[in-house]
Amino acid sequence: MINTEHAKSNRSPIWLMLWPLAILLRMTNLFGVFVDGKVFLCATDPYYHLRRILLTLNSFPSVPDFDPYLNFPTGALTHWPFGFDIIMAAIISFLTLGQADSWWVEAIGALLPPLLGGLLPLVVYLIIVNITDQFTALLAGVLTAFLPMAIFFSQIGNLDHHFLAALCQGLFWLAYLQASQQKSNIWAIISGVVLFIGFTSTTEFPFVTTIHCIYLLIVWFTVSNERRNQLILINLKIFTCATILLLPCVFTCYFEPNGVSPLLASSWFGCFILTFLLSIFASQRKLVPLALLVTVAILAIIFIFKFDFSLIVKLLAEANQSQGSNILGSSIRENRTILFDGLSYLLYWHSGFLLFLPVMIFLLIRRRTEATLLILVGLIIMQPLALTHMRLSVLLPVPFALASALVAKEGFTLTKNYFKNRLGKPIAVIITLLLFLPSINGLDFSNPAIVVSHRPFLPLYKSFNWLKLHSPSVNPNQPAYGILANEWDLGHWLIYFSERPTLSSPLLHTPELAQAVFDAAKIFVEPPAKAIKTLDSQKLKYIFLTPDDFLYLMQIAGVELPKADQGYDSLYGRLLASYGFPAGTVTHPALNRIRLVYESPEKSEGEAAPPTCMIFEVVTGAHLIGQVKPNATITLSTQLKTATNRRIPYSANTKADEKGNFDFIVPYSTSLDSSTSVFASPYVLKTDGLLTSVKVTTSQIRKGETIKVSFEQFLTGK
């Protein structure tokens, strides 16, 4: 039971220091995010949130849910939680007085995760200070501030909706405990509002309601009949509020005009069903007028006919696609299990209190108060899920910190009673610090590396900017061409930095977006001639190529892996072999429609390795035509020079027809211009002792112009 007066008298101003402490611990990579006047967020998803926030600022409070830059050329529904982007856009607009440019959006967006996520220790403190004493509450708050599983999702630069999940969970528990004990309508409404924010802003929040329903079921059999009536009423108010608030989001399509998110629709449906069941219980017990049940029943009949039940099926399909054990789901870092990462990592992620998990469960069972049962259910459900699915760790810090603090307080009490002298408290303090040590040991305030240091981001960043500056501009609402990347998780970076649409991206929330990843991989594993036709049909003008695992590409494409002694001709292999290595030579006839336009100076693994990134342009190609002896063989050669002073031989040959006509398609201009950092020396053509040289412009390359070649003109010196 909560003793509010006791809790208030227990509070001391020191608990407010938990917020700056949490912010400091989430700023360890401050100088990796703010670098040379620029702002670099971590990973790729935050950059897509930045894009949506910028779009929201221009159309507030509507969040565009259809993006032509995804799944090019079709475009795609995003189905990302719109509430998060509305909240972030509203805060940024308020702080900048509605005058935010992209730098301010990036800068404030980078700071919001630690500033808002850092509030979680305060919320945890307020939850438990109403259950026990201030010392235990401070322990819980400090542990929440230090827990890497909490820091990870709310560190500086991690502008992703996941960090709001734990905060909304904590706020809901705090409001619910206040509402259930004080029988307060205000707190019930606050609980419903928090549920609404959680459902519209995060993808994990349905687990919070699952925990809550299981908790209510358990509590039902542990309290008196009078208390059951109180629980029915307070939860009826909470879920009625949430259902009403979600109603316009699901049935008016105002926030998602192109299609309601299956997750949001299913969440509303669950809340409505729970509200209906609670109404039945309340009416049977004469806690509310029968008219309320009749009203809810009428609404249920109406909504059953209006509700799109196929959205529930879509939700299951989307969850299996993006979170399941398929090749794509298992490729996402946040979906991986940490269960087999070793004890040292598990202790770092959870702190040493993980070792006391059985003790936590035993202690919570023994206490059996409503508040401790809520913590118990949350811990039992989320701990195994968090071990097998890293993303779900976002909902573990609240129950884990609360349970750990209760165990620590019990340990202090036992130690004090066992050691009757003054050694009790010092020993308990030392043990507690040792339990914190695995997490503290991983903190690093000295690392200036850019937060995306898990991959060679800097050369990619230069490549993204080069593409933006040197490729033809596009209409944002109806782009004329798209980008193909062999690593699908680069999609959000390409969209944000290059401001160009992509075929595939890390947004896998719909089957269409997942299919785009498969389609992109298929192009790379196809033979070059077939791949070129696909590129043309899908209006993909540029290829963004990085050294990658080709076998993984084949798995994504659904192609049978070749045997060890088998060769495999693919667009990816040809481009990498022809252009990526020092000894590379371009000879394949199908590559005459693709030209290298940029390569990063950095190598992926050393001097003999391919560049970290190469950008190719798909062009129409200029036609070099002429006439020689019938059936004669003509060879063409040139040398390509890149901005890194690398020389790449380029050659081709063809046979004249019976009338002596020939036609070469060439992709390179012989003069450097702003559209490329690679140019060719004049093309040299040879046949039967005759030779000539030809110069070609970029305009001729792109328009597919025909250039007539005359060997005699060169030989006579005219």
Image: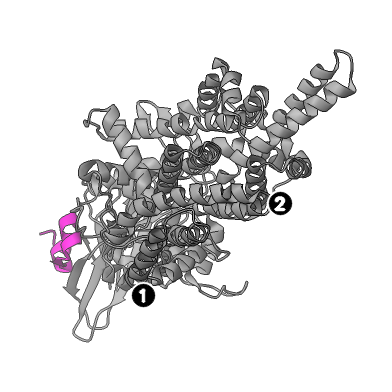
For disc 2, the marked residue is 340
Where residue 14 appears, as percent x and y from the top left, is 57, 16
Where residue 696 appears, as percent x and y from the top left, is 19, 57
User: 1 or 146: which is nearer to us?
Assistant: 1
For disc 1, the marked residue is 530
Can you tell which quarter of the image residue 446 is in? top right
* Label drawn at residue 10: none
Asked which secondary structure carries label 1, the reply is helix
Instruction: Give the residue displayed 30% in from the left and 66% down from the top.
Output: 592
Task: Examine the rendering and report whether any part of residue 614 can be seen.
Answer: no
Instruction: Give the residue displayed 41% in from the left and 30% down from the top.
Output: 111
- The N terminus appears in which quarter of the rendering? top right
Where residue 646 appears, as percent x and y from the top left, is 39, 47
Asked which secondary structure carries label 2, the reply is loop
Q: Is residue 690 left or right of residue 321?
A: left
Q: How many marks?
A: 2
Q: Residue furthest top?
A: 422
Category of crowding for the residue at label 2, using alpha-carbon neighbours closer than 10 angstroms: few (below 14), some (14–19), many (at least 20) = few
- The C terminus appears in which quarter of the rendering? bottom left
Circle 2: residue type: Phe
User: 281 or 576: which is nearer to us?
Assistant: 281
